[in-house]
Image (cartoon, helix red, strand yellow):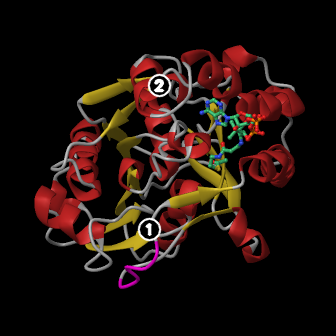
Amino acid sequence: MTGVGHYLPEKIVSNAEMAERVETSDDWITERTGIKQRHFAAPHETAAFMGAAAAREALAKAGVDALAVDAIILATSTPDQAFPATAVHVQAAIGAHKAFGFDLAAACSGFIFGLSVADAMIRAGQVSNVLVIGSEVYSRILNFEDRGTCVLFGDGAAAVLLQARDVAHSGPGLLSTHLHSDGRLAEMLYVDGAVGQPEKSGKLVMNGREVFRHAVTLLASAVNEALAANNITNKDIDWLVPHQANLRIIDGVGKKLGLPPERVVVTVDKHANTSAASIPLALYQAVSDGRILPGQLVLLEALGGGLTWGSALLRL
Ligand code: ACO
C-alpha cells in the first residue's frame, strides 16, 4: 500500500444542526454513537467527484502517474448512476486511460472486499497498480424522517494505491483478508428500492438493535480469523482500524480483542459512518498524523448491509 488519499465534502453538519432537522439532541447522538458531526455533500460532490479527488491524492502520495494504473475498484452503495460504473467516471477524471474499472457493492464492508479482490489480482500477476476506493454519499439515501438512522451517516471518500512488490515475508503488504456474507440477514439493513422503482422510497432502512447485536460478535470472529491465519496474537497488532459505525461497537470489538483504546483509530466522531469510505478515511487520518508508521501491523475490520463482514491484516 504505497499511497493513501481522501476527500471530505466542505459542508460540516453538527449534531446541533441535525437537532434542528429531526427530534434529537447532541447528548443522545454522542452517548449512543460517539458521533459529533458529519460531512454532507453538495450536489457536485458525487461519489465519482469525491473518489477522483481521493485517487489523485493517493497517486500523488505514491509518486505514481495515473497512466500507470491498471485497475480501479470502487466500493460504493451510492453510485452516480446504476451504470456506467462510478469507477469509469473516476478513470476519466484522473486520466487513468490504461486502467479498467468496476464498482463493488458490499455496503460498509466494501473497502475490505475491494482490498481482497485487488490483492488476488496482483498475486495472480494480472495487474501491478490498483486503486481501491471507497466513496459514499449516504446523505442522498437517508430518510430524514427517521431519527434512528439519519443521524448516523455522513459522506466522504478515500483511496489507496496497491502496488505489486516482490517483498520478503515480513515486508510490507496485505497479509490476509477474510470475507463473509449472510443474505438471510438482508432485511436488517438495506436500501428500499432500486433504479426503475419509483414506488419505493430509495432510502436506507435499518433495524439498529439487531445490527448492533450481530456486529460485535461477527466482527470479533473476523478479527480472530485474521489472527489465527497469521499465527499471531492481539499483542502483535500495532493498530486496529475498524469500520467507523458507532463508538460502542468499536469499543466492544477493541475490548474483546484486548486492545487498549490508544491502539484503536477512531474518526466516527468527525465523519460519522461513511460506509465503504470509513476505513480508508480512518487509515488516511492515522497515517497522515504520524500515528501509523511504516513497518507496523494494522488490522482492519468491517460489517455492513448484506450482512457482509470481514477483516484484513496488513503491514504498512
Ligand atoms: N435522537 C433521540 N432519540 C432517538 C433517536 C435520536 N436520533 N433515535 C432513536 N431514538 C429513541 C427511540 O425512539 C427510542 O425511544 P423510545 O424508547 O421512547 O421508543 C429510544 O431512542 C431507543 O431507541 P433504540 O433504537 O432502541 O436505541 P438504541 O439504544 O438501540 O440505539 C442505535 C440506536 C444508535 C442505532 C443503535 O442501535 C446502534 O448503534 N446500532 C448499530 C447500528 C449501526 O451502527 N448501523 C450502522 C450501519 S451497520 C454498520 O456499519 C455496522
Look at the image and say whether residue 198 sits in the magenta stretch: yes
The structure residue drawn at horizontal position 70% and vertical position 69%, both measured from the top left corner, is: 187
Image position of 166 (left or right of 51)? right
The percent coordinates of residue 124 (x first, y second) are: 51, 76
Q: Viewer-nearest of labels 2 and 1?
A: 2
Look at the image and say whether residue 94 sits in the magenta stretch: no
Q: Which residues are magenta?
A: 196-200
Which dot marks residue 314? none
The secondary structure that dominates the magenta segment is loop
Q: Which quadrant of the render holds ligand 1?
A: top right
The structure residue drawn at horizontal position 32% and vertical position 68%, both measured from the top left corner, is: 71
Q: Report crowding for label 2: few under 14, some 14 to 19, many 20 or more residues within 10 A (C-alpha).
A: some
Is 25 drawn above or below residue 56 in the view shown?
above
Q: Amino acid at mark 1?
A: Gly
Depth check: give the residue in front, 37 or 192: 192
Q: Report crowding for label 1: few under 14, some 14 to 19, many 20 or more residues within 10 A (C-alpha).
A: some
Depth check: give the residue in front, 200 or 52: 200
The percent coordinates of residue 284 (x first, y second) are: 42, 32
- Asked whether residue 178 appears in the rendered view, the answer is no
Image position of 311 (left or right of 222)? left
Residue pointed to by mark 1: 202
| Label 1 beta carbon within 8 A of ligand 1 | no
The percent coordinates of residue 162 (x first, y second) are: 41, 53
Q: Amino acid at mark 2?
A: Ala
Image position of 249 (left or right of 224)? left
The structure residue drawn at horizontal position 53% and vertical position 58%, both measured from the top left corner, is: 204
Q: State the count of labels.
A: 2
Is 91 drawn above or below residue 207 in the view shown?
below
Which dot marks residue 19? 2
Task: Measure how far apart labels 2 and 1 are at the Cα level.
Answer: 23 Å
The percent coordinates of residue 288 (x first, y second) are: 39, 23
Is 77 drawn above or below residue 286 in the view shown?
below
